[in-house]
Image: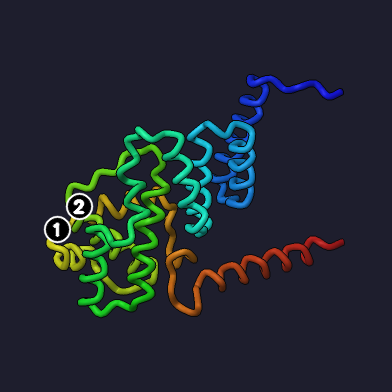
Amino acid sequence: MPKKQTGKENRRKAQAHDEQGLRAYQAWDVEQAIHHFKAAARIIPDEPDYPLHLAQALARGGDFDQALPALAEFMRLEPESKLADRFEQLFASGMDEVEQLLTGKMTIAGMPLEEIGTAIQMWLEYRITLGREPLVVRKAETWAAALDYTVRKVNLRPVKRKEIAALYNVSDRAVQDRHADLVNALDVMPCDYRYFTGQDNPLDKLVEAAEMLEQLEARFQEP
């Protein structure tokens, strides 16, 4: 008869899965990260960090429909969390102040609807990705400006940061700082597939070139 596992053994296994999930998350192996966080949550279902980490991984993979239930589970396990107000806003039917500003200003500027939607998606993902880190919104216009600027840069639009700062009536330095926060937290890169809305992504050509180089290298090394 198999030996019944103790609570201590279960917690050790769950922690191991969580640590593996965090490493996979950092390495952008989203599928493995999700697998390990789910495993950790199954073993120790009352540990709030596991559904929180799962929500972060699901958001990174663009699966927001599943990320929100994971956040709801986190809030159920930790109802007095300081993060409750931030996460509860994600379940609201209306737009918050940042999203309202984004929609209004980007529409006035003639930005495509797809890019406006992408900026709102970036804001959603950022708030989940922060996890237990605090989110300070002293001025909604600053975050809206940074999101607008970041999405335009990802989509290779010829825009100056000072122009965006003037559009939202905020300082250039503030936009620079919040832009850096977004890039660092979300690991944003030029033409990022999550936020690029064009039909032909230049990154595809880089991938093709890398694959071709690998094939040529293999042929070159053939005896």
At 44% across and 70% down in the image, what residue appears?
Answer: 196
116 to the left or right of 207: left
The image position of residue 57, as x and y in percent, is 52, 49
136 to the left or right of 3: left
- Say what secondary structure mark 1 lies in: loop
The image position of residue 15, as x and y in percent, is 59, 29
- Say what secondary structure mark 2 lies in: helix
| Residue 127 versus residue 36 in the image, above or below | below
Contact check, label 1 and label 2, Cβ < 8 Å: yes
Q: Nearer the viewer, residue 60 or 92?
A: 92
At 87% across and 23% down in the image, what residue appears?
Answer: 1
In the rendered image, the quadrant that contains the C terminus is: bottom right
At 12% across and 62% down in the image, what residue appears?
Answer: 169
Q: Amino acid at mark 1?
A: Val
Query: For residue 5, what is the image quadrant?
Result: top right
Instruction: Identify the image's colour scheme: rainbow, by chain, secondary structure or one colour.
Output: rainbow
The image position of residue 99, as x and y in percent, is 27, 62
Q: Amino acid at mark 2?
A: Ala
Residue 174: numbered disc: 2
At 63% across and 25% down in the image, what residue appears?
Answer: 12
Q: Nearer the viewer, residue 195 or 4?
A: 4
For the residues labelled 1 and 2, the Cα–Cα distance comes to: 7 Å
Query: For residue 153, what is the image quadrant?
Result: bottom left
Q: Residues within 10 Å of mark 1 (few under 14, many from 20)?
A: some
Q: Residues within 10 Å of mark 2 (few under 14, many from 20)?
A: some
Task: Check disc 1 and report the residue beneath it.
Answer: 170
